[in-house]
Amino acid sequence: MSVPTLPEPSPPTDAQKLRMRGVALLAGVLFGAGLLISGMTRPAKVVGFLDVAGAWDPSLALVMVGAIGVYAVAARLARRRDRPIYADGFQWPTPRDIDGRLIGGSALFGVGWGLVGYCPGPAIVGLGAGSMSAAWFCGAMALGMVAYRFTAGRAAP
Amino acid sequence: MVDFTPVPALLGGVLIGLGASVLLLGGGRILGVCGITGSLLDNPSDDDAGWRRAFLIGLVFTGLAGSAFSPALVGVPVLAEGPSLVPMLVVGGLLVGFGTRMANGCTSGHGVCGIARGSARSLAATATFMVTGGLTVYVVHHVLTGAP
């Protein structure tokens, strides 16, 4: 490995990586439990929310209210800190414009979401629960993700 | 409002927010399921692959534990029964995978984390996928089936 001429963030140590894995595992369990308890792993609940013209089920809106409320506090706390507890720095998304890629991608995502009632998180939880539907969906989703990278002709950021 | 479940919805939402908060305050990262999954597929052996894998293992584990508790927690897609189910899942999965990578975020990254940070981009993304999702449900469940 060549010596960098400019100061770069040092690569994480093994101990840091391990702590980061612990943090991510806990985050995954909490997030997954939230999806299960809220009913969002049941595609019928999601489609029920999107079905404004039918028997509308507003549950998903309350899920978002709860999640956004908690996370807004966490984001505020994070802004006041120099660094997170177990890593060297916060990686905030770099601000960008509202462009065709954002809107076009979101539009495609919405069509797929409405078609079957799965978005990535609940589908992966469903995979763990042994749902064949979720397994088909996750396989196709992974393919779609890789397909985007190839059409975009670059490594993802 | 056939199946409105306000208390579990709010409680589950709080847990989702807590999970995202743990990843932010503990590790400094945004919890976006598609970003984590897609980045892992793109870069399966970089410095971040370990924690991304750990997060996904956490998600899969809750599914496993949840289904042991109650199979009803994890339902099947409403739409389709029989032979149209698998093609529908595949088309849906392809669109969700491609679209979320294109838009750099999905329900978690844009819908929860982005909106909570006050990002106009995330609000625009969320509004867009809600609208196209709603239109798709309308077409599939009302227009195609002939229901009112």
Image (tube, coloured by chain):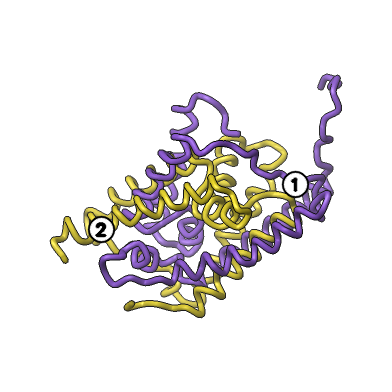
Chain colours: A purple, B yellow
> Where is residue B125 drawn, in percent x and y?
47, 47
Q: Residue A13 vs residue A91: left or right?
A: right
Q: Nearer the viewer, residue B72 or B102?
A: B102
Q: Quadrant of the N terminus of chain B?
A: bottom left
Q: Residue A130 vs residue B78: left or right?
A: right
Residue located beneath label 2 in the image: B138
- What amino acid type is highlighted by mark number 2? Tyr
Q: Quadrant of the C terminus of chain B?
A: bottom left
Say which residue appears at 81% left-offset and 22% top-offset.
A1
> Where is residue B79 drawn, in percent x and y?
27, 61
Work out whether B9 lies above or below B119: below
Secondary structure of the residue carrying numbered label 1: loop
Extreme residue toward the left, this view = B146
Say which residue appears at 47% left-offset and 77% top-offset.
B70
Q: CA distance from mark 1 to mark 2?
A: 41 Å
Residue A151 shows which numbered tag?
none
Residue located beneath label 1 in the image: A90
Say which residue appears at 69% left-offset and 49% top-offset.
B29
> Where is residue A74 drawn, in percent x and y?
70, 61
